[in-house]
Structures are given as structure tokens and as C-alpha cells.
Image (spheres, helix red, strand yellow):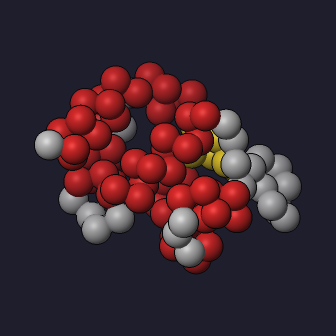
Amino acid sequence: MEKALWYLLTATRGGANRARIIDALTERPQNANELADELDVGYKTIRHHMEQLEEHDIVESGEESYAKLYFLTDRFDKYRETFEDITEQMDT
């Protein structure tokens, strides 16, 4: 998971948006439309990032296919400190 976080947040162009998505989901579960509105990012862009985050077991979605909610995984919570360390370095 640590390597996945470094890759997703620093080695790709969408790292800053992915960090913002994770921060938003820390506050409460949201669907892609809510994230797009809150972060002022296009819906398709959010969907792309959510696919990447799901693939690396950082987020998971609820059962609904329409307006499904996204949650941070329990596995991610174990690496939250790593996430915080990475985002601190991104800000400098």
C-alpha cells in the first residue's frame, strides 16, 4: 500500500486531485457527483481517479450502481500516516 500511495500521489499527473479526493472522503462518504462539485473537477475526471483508487484498494464503493457512495477502505486507514507524510512533502 505504501508504494501504491507514493505512485498514485507523486508519480502521476493526477496526484494532487487524488489527495484532495482522499481528504474529502475522510470527512464523509460521497458519490462522484458530490466530489466533482466539492472539488470543482469534472465528473469524468473524478470517475477516472476513483477507478485508480479502487484498483489500489484505497477506496471502495457501496452496493448501489446509481449514485454509489465511495468510502476509504480499512486497509487505507492503516496507512493514513503514510498518506499524511506524502501530502506534507507534496505541499513543500
- Quarter of the image that includes the N terminus: top left
Q: Position of residue 45 (x, y in %)?
A: 51, 73
Eyeballing the image, is 76 above or below 29? above
- Residue 8: quadrant of the picture: bottom left
Q: Position of residue 54 (x, y in %)?
A: 54, 53
From this viewpoint, is residue 49 visible? yes
Eyeballing the image, is 88 above or below 70? above
- Quarter of the image that includes the C terminus: top left
Horizontal relation, residue 9 to residue 73: left or right: left
Horizontal relation, residue 31 to residue 79: left or right: right
Residue at point 84%, 64% (across, down): 66
Residue 41 or 10: which is nearer the viewer? 41
Horizontal relation, residue 82 to residue 42: left or right: left
Q: Position of residue 59 (x, y in %)?
A: 57, 45
Residue at point 61%, 34% (across, down): 27
Q: Position of residue 6 (x, y in %)?
A: 25, 46
Q: How many marks?
A: 0
Residue at point 50%, 51% (across, down): 21
Residue at point 47%, 33% (across, down): 76
Outermost left residue: 92
Eyeballing the image, is 40 above or below 69? below
From this viewpoint, is residue 3 visible? no
